[in-house]
Amino acid sequence: MSGRGKGKGMRWSGQGGAKRHLVRIRGPDEAFRSKFKKGAIKRLARRAGVERVGGVVYESVREVMKKFMRKVIRDAIVYAHYANRKTITLIDVLHALKRQSQTLYGFQ
């Protein structure tokens, strides 16, 4: 077999199989909204001692979380770039949090 056909590809040839489903590309805002759902925000509020959460709170909490995450990720990227790496590690995130006076304990 030459492996040049349009089928599923040869076995173990490194070619991908037939694509069965289309992947929907989301924008950054929609992807962020799908990650921080109402239930997750309610759980965070319960842990902080809040009994009831109003409906208008969810979007504002998402905005605050997005700003916080962008700052942390931007600083972590700087640390990874300085270390000549393309992958952000746990240490990069811990240093980025420490830089913003948000020390996270329990990780080394």
Image (cartoon, rainbow, N blue to C red):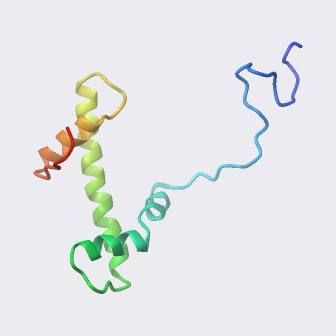
Quadrant, the C terminus: top left
Residue at 30 percent across and 34 percent down: it is 89
Image position, residue 3 (x, y; %) = 84, 17
Q: Residue at x 74, y 19 (%)?
A: 13
Q: Residue at x 44, y 69 (%)?
A: 37
| Vertical relation: 44 (above or below) 51 | above
Q: Position of residue 69 (x, y in %)?
A: 30, 53
Viewport quadrant of the N terminus? top right
- Observer-nearest residue: 32 or 43? 43
- Specify whether 63 is left or right of 17: left
Residue ranking furthest to the front: 106
Identify the image quadrant of residue 58.
bottom left
Give the left or right position of residue 12, taking residue 6 as reference: left
Residue 65 screen position, x and y as percent:
30, 62
* Left or right of residue 10, residue 81 in this image: left
Residue at 42 percent across and 74 percent down: it is: 38
Q: Is residue 83 above or below residue 25?
A: above
Q: State the residue lying farthest toward the left.
A: 101
* Residue furthest out toward the top: 2
| Picture mark count | 0
Q: On the image, which quarter does residue 74 sit in?
A: top left
> In the displayed structure, would residue 83 be above or below residue 47?
above
The image quadrant of residue 93 is top left
Q: Is residue 64 left or right of residue 27?
A: left
